[in-house]
Structures are given as structure tokens and as C-alpha cells.
Amino acid sequence: MKNNKEFLSPTIAKAIYIDEAELCLKKEVKEMTLENISKRQFLWVSLFIACAVAIASLGFWSCAESKLDKTVQEAYDLRMNGKADEAKTLLEQAISENPDNALAHYELARTKYHMGLANIRELITSIEDIQHSIEQAVKNDPDNVIYRFFAGHIAFQSAYIAVQRDQPDVKEKVAKLCSTYESVLKLKPDYHEAMLYLVDIYGILPEDMGGDKSKAEQYAKKLEEMNEIFGAKARAILMPEETDYIGYWQKVLEKHEGNAEVLRELGRQYLFKDQVEDGVKCFEEAVRIDPGQNILILDLARYHAYTGLRDEKLRDTAWPLAEKAFERYLDSEPIPPQLKAFVLNLLSRIKRGMGDQEGADELLEEAKNIDPYYSRATGVPTLDLFVPLGEISRNHRYLFLPF
């Protein structure tokens, strides 16, 4: 409407925007010739109709967008309640009606990935389709950092599969992975998690797979300048294997006493050295300070489970500890259904290994009832699957470590 004002006489413009329209129009009419009345009325009516159509169109698209958002939200809610297949159907229908809907493509990519984790062989064959969905989201909303960040996760899965299957295009896929996270930083230069992923990728992978120590160093220095904790994480990735990592994180903790993230890092290093009691203390303190760190309880449970798998002599002690930690994590509600079902499946394996076949079967059945598409992978499903629509992920899990 503001753009149309300059085409109207001051009096008519005033008449449109204030309550004294009738009085102003009468005065304007007296000063017009018949010819001017005709021309001015025609212009006024034309503009009025044009504006009315524009407003109506705006209202239509606004309603359509609102309806679409509700549809995508409904699909997300269905998936969060263990109905990923219904969510997928709803999203595909929404996209068929509006192929340019970025949010629907994003949620469809997450839904497909969620479902793919239930059958790793199918995930391997469907990763390109999942990648296509998230790329459609990016294409239709290129300035949305949320979509690009999740695209980075899918690009990593694609590259990881290529590495595991010794495919010839590994380096190409790693380059695509890195460029995806770099595109995230172009939109949000202070996205620490994305930058740390680049340090991880460039710093850990060998050159023939796309690694680049000099680039890793550049990003590590940037992180050190931007955020001391993330900078410390980046520097730790690049340190030699023989480094005293426990001593390193102890020094960081001295400077950042009571920091849950630092306690998390120190606890991990204790577990890598099988100094379990110290690792547990760090994890416990981290969760006490920040209850949102309760994923550490799951990491601890998995550590005990894998200890028993690695060494049969330790099973009698390790697996009961794993069972206790799994159960504690399950009590730390709320937990996304897929994650809860994933944990129930792991716990059922422990019970079966301890000779409790009936208990194992009950847990497995419960897991399937909660979410038939729960992850059968050994690693914890990415928490980015559970980030609410419209929220930027602040999750980070090391790409080449078990936790």
C-alpha cells in the first residue's frame, strides 16, 4: 500500500488511511472536472482492486504457509511418538502439493534417516535419496543454517559409507562434506560446532581421503580465538597420540572449574585409559551441573557393555554395571522415543548375555512397541534427529570416537 500512495492525490491518499474518508472525498470531488473525476476515479478503483488482490493473495499464501507449517509439525510430532512411517507419508503428500517447501524436505530427510537406522543395509542403499531430500531443503531455502548443518551430517554418513566400502569416490565425498560445513560457516561464522567438525575431518583423515592438516590448524586457531572451550577441544584433536590427554584436560579444568563440558572431556579421557572410577566422577559431576548432559550416562553404559564384549573375563562385573547405567538413563525422562527404544534394545542384549532370556525378550518387545524404527546401529543416533523444528542444533559428537 505504501508504494501506491505516491500515485494518488494527497487528499485521496489521506482518505484511504484515516477515518475522515467521506469528508475528504467530497472536497476532492468539488475541485475536479468531469474528465478528471473519471480519470482519477478509474486510477483509484484500479489501485484499490490491485491492492485488494495483493492483500488477498498475501492472505492466501500466508494461510497456505501456516497450514504447511502445521503439517510439518504434525509429521514431526508423529515421528517423535514412534510413527515415522505415518510422518513420511504426510510429508510426501505435503511436498507433492508444494515441491518448494524447504521445511517439509528437511523433515522428510530426518524422517528417512530415522527410518533408515532401523536397517543399516537399507540405510546404505538409501543414503543418496536422503541426501537428495536435504539438498532440496537447502535449494529452496539456501540461507537457512539449520538445513545446511543437517546436510553436513548426512554428507558425513555418505562419506563414511564410502570409506567402509572402499569406494573410489571417498575423497570426492569428503570434499563435499567439508564444503557443506564451510557453507554453514558462511551463513553463521560463529557456529562453533560446525567449525569443530571441520577440525575433526581435516585433522583426522589422511590426505588421500581428503584430510588437510593445515586447514584443520586454521580452523583450530579460529576456535581458540572465539571460544576457549571449543578451542581446547579443537587443539586436543590435533595433538599427537602420545599426548597426556588427561593432564591436558586437568589443566583446562583448573582454568574453567565447574565447567560441565570440560568435565565431560576429562571423563572421556579417563574412560579411554580405563580409569573408570575417575571417569564416573567426572560424568556424575557434569550431569549434576548440567542435567542436559545426561547422555553421558548412556555413554558410560555403552562403555561397560563394550568392556564386557572385549574381554570375557570382565563380563561378570562390566555387564551388571552396564545394566545399572542403562536403567538409570531410562529413568532420566524425558527421552525421545527412538532413543529410548534404542537403549531398551541395548539393555536387552546385556540381559540376554547375562542369561535372562525372558527379560531380554520383554525389553525387545517394548522397544518395538515404542518405535519400530529405532536404530539398530551400535552408535548413539545423532541428537539432531530430535531437535525441534526451527531450532539450531547445538549438538556435537566426535566423528571418529565411540563417544
Image (tube, helix red, strand yellow):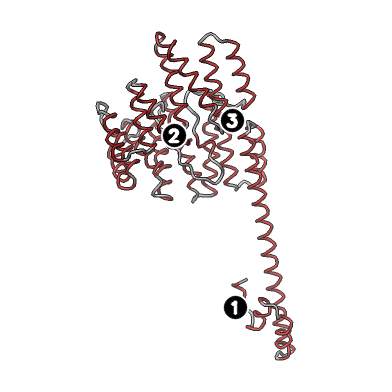
Residue 106 or 167: which is nearer the viewer? 106
Residue 149 position within the rendered picture, expressed as x and y whole percent measured from the top left:
46, 42
- The quarter of the rendered structure image containing the C terminus is top left
198 lies above or below 38: above
Which one is earlier in the sequence, the residue at label 2 or at label 1?
1
Calculate the distance from the C-alpha at mark 3 to the C-alpha at mark 2.
24 Å
Kindly identify the amino acid type of the residue bearing the numbered disc 2: Arg
Q: Residue at x 68, y 76 (%)?
A: 16
Left or right: 368 as drawn, with respect to 307: right
Residue wearing tag 1: 6
Residue 324 position within the rendered picture, expressed as x and y whole percent measured from the top left:
49, 20
Q: Residue at x 34, y 23 (%)?
A: 272
Calculate the distance from the C-alpha at mark 2 to the C-alpha at mark 1.
63 Å
Kindly identify the amino acid type of the residue bearing the numbered disc 3: Pro
Left or right: 358 as drawn, with respect to 27: left
Which one is earlier in the sequence, the residue at label 3 or at label 2?
2
Calculate the distance from the C-alpha at mark 1 to the C-alpha at mark 3.
58 Å
Please state which of the two labelled residues, at mark 1 or mark 3, is closer to the viewer: 3
Please state which of the two labelled residues, at mark 3 or mark 2, is closer to the viewer: 2
Residue wearing tag 3: 337
| Mark 2 neighbour class, 10 Å CA radius: few under 14, some 14 to 19, many 20 or more | few
Residue 299 position within the rendered picture, expressed as x and y whole percent measured from the top left:
44, 26
188 lies above or below 256: below
Residue wearing tag 2: 288
